[in-house]
Amino acid sequence: MRANFTQLYLHFVWATWDRLPLITPDIQEFIYAAIIGECNQLGCTVIAVGGIEDHVHLLIGFPPTLAVSETIKQIKGSSSHLITHEINPGKFFKWQGSYGAFTVSYDAIDNVANYIRNQAIHHSQTSINPTWELTPNSPFS
């Protein structure tokens, strides 16, 4: 092989502070736009972003030059900064410090992306995937 080739995909999940319903409809699109913007700056390819009022899922194509922990730190930090300094200054908004990160095979991208895009439906029908969701027993809830 004459050139490097990588096919790395990560599914991130993280929650609001104390699982408070802080992702209100009026700021949800701003949060997602900030997440997408930071991913683009980092060289990640956003495949899907979605969630409900207390957590976010993100599926990205991940370049091998980044560290997982630094990537999520940048994504969470930039979105939180946007909300607290530009969109809703003076109102409380904060992410929990923890997160979940899962590798995704190329063949599973469509299924995971569809799951992420349909978060509201999965949560209303309780058809969630417990491995990917923030449950009382998960280490990042």
Image (spheres, rainbow, N blue to C red):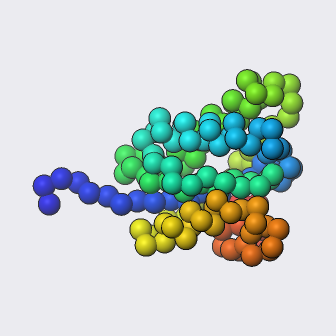
Compared with 126, 61 (above or below) is above
x 55%, y 36%: residue: 37
Location of residue 55 (image quadrant): bottom right
Residue 14 horizontal/vertical position (percent): 69, 54
Residue 76 in sight from this viewpoint: no
Compared with 85, 76 (above or below) is below
x 81%, y 51%: residue: 53
Q: Is residue 136 left or right of residue 97?
A: right
> Which of the two residues, 109 or 38, is positioned nearer the viewer here?
109
> Which of the two residues, 8 or 46, is positioned nearer the viewer here?
46
Compared with 109, 39 (above or below) is above
Q: Give the position of the N terminus as an image quadrant.
A: bottom left
Q: Give the position of the C terminus as an image quadrant.
A: bottom right
Residue 52 in sight from this viewpoint: yes
Residue 123 horizontal/vertical position (percent): 79, 67
Residue 10 horizontal/vertical position (percent): 50, 59
x 51%, y 67%: residue: 110
Residue 46 horizontal/vertical position (percent): 51, 49
> Which of the two residues, 54 or 136, is positioned nearer the viewer here?
54
Q: How many marks?
A: 0
Q: Is residue 103 left or right of residue 24?
A: left
x 55%, y 71%: residue: 111
> Which of the two residues, 24 or 130, is positioned nearer the viewer here?
24
